[in-house]
Amino acid sequence: MNEKTKYSEEELQEFRAIITEKLAVAKQEYDNYRAVLTNADGNDTVDTSPTYKVLEEGASTLSKEEAGRLAQRQMKFIQGLQSALVRIENGTYGICRETGKLIPKERLRAVPHATLSIEAKEGGKK
């Protein structure tokens, strides 16, 4: 029995739709993190009393650091999704980069930017 080596155009369309939807959400979340970093929401400590100002500034700094980390992580996720769209276009989507076998649909539906099968990720190449 021949093992399937690539997904059909119909299957790729399903994955493209999943990725496009996740990409839109990811970009919105990234924009939200960027807004926190640039203080675009206008929350400032200018009008608070000095006692609270110190606490607010500390919380603001912590919040911005966390937002920065989350923004970086979100950008990496966006880049992974964009790379997945490129792989769909060039016909390599869903193929494990280590084993050369198809990554199961269930995994791709959950992690559409995956480039490794669970088997390869866990190091048990068969």
Image: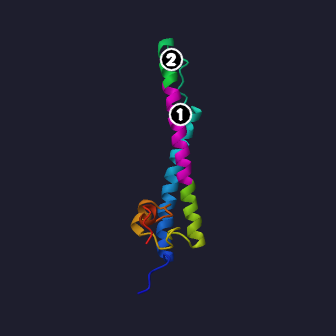
Residue that badge 1 annotates: 65
Label number found at residue 97: none
Q: Is residue 126 left or right of residue 91?
A: left
Q: Which residue type does callout 2 highlight?
A: Val
Q: Which residue type does callout 1 highlight?
A: Glu
Judged by its main secondary structure, the magenta piece is helix
Q: Nearer the viewer, residue 116 or 110?
A: 116
Q: Is residue 64 left or right of residue 105?
A: right
Distance from Cα at disc 1 to Cα at disc 2:
17 Å
Say how many tags the image has.
Answer: 2
For residue 69: magenta? Answer: yes
Vertical placement of 36 versus 80: above or below?
above
First to last magenta residue range:
59-78
Place of residue 76 in the rendered image (x, y in percent of width and height, measured from the top left): 55, 51
Place of residue 21 in the rendered image (x, y in percent of width and height, measured from the top left): 49, 58
Q: Residue at x 48, y 64 (%)?
A: 116
Most extreme residue toward the left is: 106
Q: Residue at x 47, y 16 (%)?
A: 52
Place of residue 73 in the rendered image (x, y in percent of width and height, measured from the top left): 52, 46
Whichever of callouts 1 and 2 sits on the residue coming sooner in the sequence is 2
Q: Nearer the viewer, residue 34 or 1?
A: 1
* Crowding near the residue tagged with mark 1, few <14, some 14–19, many ≥20 C-alpha atoms within 10 Å: some
Place of residue 7 in the rendered image (x, y in percent of width and height, measured from the top left): 48, 75
* Crowding near the residue tagged with mark 2, few <14, some 14–19, many ≥20 C-alpha atoms within 10 Å: few
Q: Residue at x 51, y 12 (%)?
A: 50
Quadrant for the N terminus in the image: bottom left
Label number found at residue 54: 2
